[in-house]
Image (cartoon, rainbow, N blue to C red):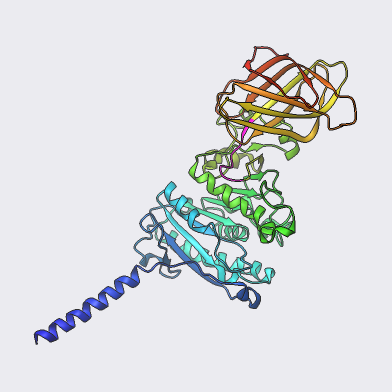
């Protein structure tokens, strides 16, 4: 009798332990390969829930009964992370880190929308068709959330490539009442030139932002949000290969850079200022640096904290912005507006190289995107972006060249050079009465600028 009782207890404990173990199993994103892409996959949407309790162990969230999962807290904000086209079937390399950064920043529900079955297909047009179906699936879930008390304003949808348009279709189903949509290099093929009803547009959420990094290939070219960021002009990204001989990186590096730029913004350790401007040329020429004209808080920043400027941006309608980055993290550059007044009798054309030093480290930039015109007593201005912040600046080196090696060397006589920092609220640096000989470095100590309009 005792043996029988003990045996039943052992069976009961074993079963209980098995169920407890199953409840703790971690879900992972669907992992497919090229053979699935070649044969094609049918759409199957899985929702993977992460919270601060299970940062590294996803729990499956049921579409039909999401509230049966005790870790899904409707009183917390919810962020949907939606990937795009997966031609090789592998999970995104950035997924785990993206989830961790979001949960480090804020206590929330992070819902990874796994539609790899449906996104893995050599037939891109079939995948595009599936975006509407994914949006319908998410709409059903969010409707259940709203009925049970969730605030739509607390929902943030982050969509990568095709995921951006999925976010837009979902938001449109709620007449733009969803709080925020972030589009990371929204897909261009099959969406360029389409009317707002067939793609993401500013009416799909209370605040829509779009980051463009590959607009000349896989990304969307025109404005899509209340604010559109064009990193390094929106096309070729620094550090990405320029020839097809680099393999798969040639196709995905520019497109994927949007994800890494946005991820860097979540930590906030190296903020990137986005300058409203009509073109990348005007931005590089230093014509769009006056952030005081934009909002009382200055120019907006890229990424997660841009919501601080939401009301102003929504009121303005659609704002185009530009910035430059380094080729790897930390991506933020440190900008100066460079103003030069010369007193040569004749007008000269040429390029400048500037080096800043604090005698321990230095940063250098070559201003070679176009030949600058130096006309007597006429101020020439250009944007100078350095890869690091060298403070305090104790020495500046300057080199002038015309790019015409066979001609006699020119001399550029400077009446004034002025470097105005665009970050950190530092005072402008000046130097007066300098002579630059072509292709020779001139090093000098900057001094505080005089109160003068010369």
In percent of width and height, residue 418 lies at 68, 20
Q: What are the residue bounds of the magenta stretch?
A: 328-335
Left or right: 309 with respect to 58? right
444 or 418, which is in the foreground? 444
Left or right: 4 with respect to 70? left
In percent of width and height, residue 25 lies at 37, 69
Left or right: 300 with respect to 67? right
Residue under the point 63% across and 48% down: 211
Magenta stretch: includes residue 269: no
On screen, residue 71 above or below 357: below
In percent of width and height, residue 74 lies at 39, 57
In percent of width and height, residue 419 lies at 66, 23
Left or right: 199 with respect to 147? right
Quadrant of the image containing the C terminus? top right
287 or 369, which is in the foreground? 369
Residue at the farthest left position: 1
316 or 281, which is in the foreground? 281
On screen, residue 6 above or below 205: below
Q: How many marks?
A: 0
Q: Residue 196's quadrant in the figure?
A: bottom right
Q: Residue 301's quadrant in the figure?
A: top right
On screen, residue 52 above or below 336: below
């Amino acid at each position: 009798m005792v043996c029988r009782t003990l045996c039943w207890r052992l069976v009961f404990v074993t079963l209980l332990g098995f169920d407890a173990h199953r409840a703790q199993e971690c879900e992972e994103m669907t992992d497919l390969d090229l053979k699935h892409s070649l044969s094609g996959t049918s759409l199957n949407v899985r929702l993977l829930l992460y919270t601060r309790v299970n940062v590294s162990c996803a729990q499956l969230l049921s579409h039909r009964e999401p509230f049966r999962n005790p870790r899904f807290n409707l009183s917390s904000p919810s962020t949907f992370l939606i990937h795009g086209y997966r031609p090789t079937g592998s999970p995104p390399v950035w997924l785990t880190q993206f989830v961790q950064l979001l949960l480090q920043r804020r206590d929330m529900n992070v819902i990874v929308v796994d539609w790899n079955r449906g996104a893995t297909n050599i037939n891109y047009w079939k995948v595009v068709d599936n975006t509407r179906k994914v949006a319908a699936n998410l709409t059903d879930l969010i409707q259940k959330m709203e009925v049970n008390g969730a605030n739509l304003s607390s929902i943030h949808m982050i969509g990568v490539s095709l995921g951006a348009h999925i976010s837009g279709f979902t938001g449109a189903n709620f007449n733009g009442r969803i709080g925020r949509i972030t589009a990371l290099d929204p897909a261009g093929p099959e969406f360029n030139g389409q009317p707002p009803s067939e793609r993401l547009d500013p009416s799909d959420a209370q605040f829509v932002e779009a980051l463009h990094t590959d607009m000349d290939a896989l990304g969307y070219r025109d404005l899509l949000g209340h604010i559109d960021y064009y990193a390094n002009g929106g096309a070729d990204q620094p550090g990405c290969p320029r020839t097809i001989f680099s393999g798969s990186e040639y196709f995905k590096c520019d497109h994927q850079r949007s994800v890494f730029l946005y991820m860097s913004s979540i930590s906030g350790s190296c903020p990137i200022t986005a300058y409203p401007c009509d073109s990348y040329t005007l931005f590089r020429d230093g014509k769009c640096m006056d952030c005081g004209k934009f909002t009382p808080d200055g120019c907006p920043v890229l990424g997660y904290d841009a919501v601080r400027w939401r009301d102003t941006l929504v009121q303005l309608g659609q704002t185009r912005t530009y910035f430059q980055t380094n080729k790897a993290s930390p991506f933020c550059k440190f900008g100066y507006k460079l103003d030069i007044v010369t007193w040569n009798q004749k007008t000269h054309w040429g390029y400048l190289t500037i080096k800043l030093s604090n005698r321990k480290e230095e940063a250098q930039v070559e201003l070679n995107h176009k030949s600058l015109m130096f006309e007597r007593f006429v101020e020439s201005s250009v944007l100078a972006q350095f890869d690091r912040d060298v403070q305090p600046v104790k020495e500046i080196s300057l080199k002038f060249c015309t790019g015409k090696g066979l001609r006699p060397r020119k001399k550029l006589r400077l009446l004034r050079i002025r470097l105005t920092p665009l970050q950190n609220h530092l005072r402008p640096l000046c130097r007066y009465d300098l002579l630059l000989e072509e292709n020779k470095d001139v090093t000098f100590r900057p001094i505080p600028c005089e109160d003068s309009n010369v």
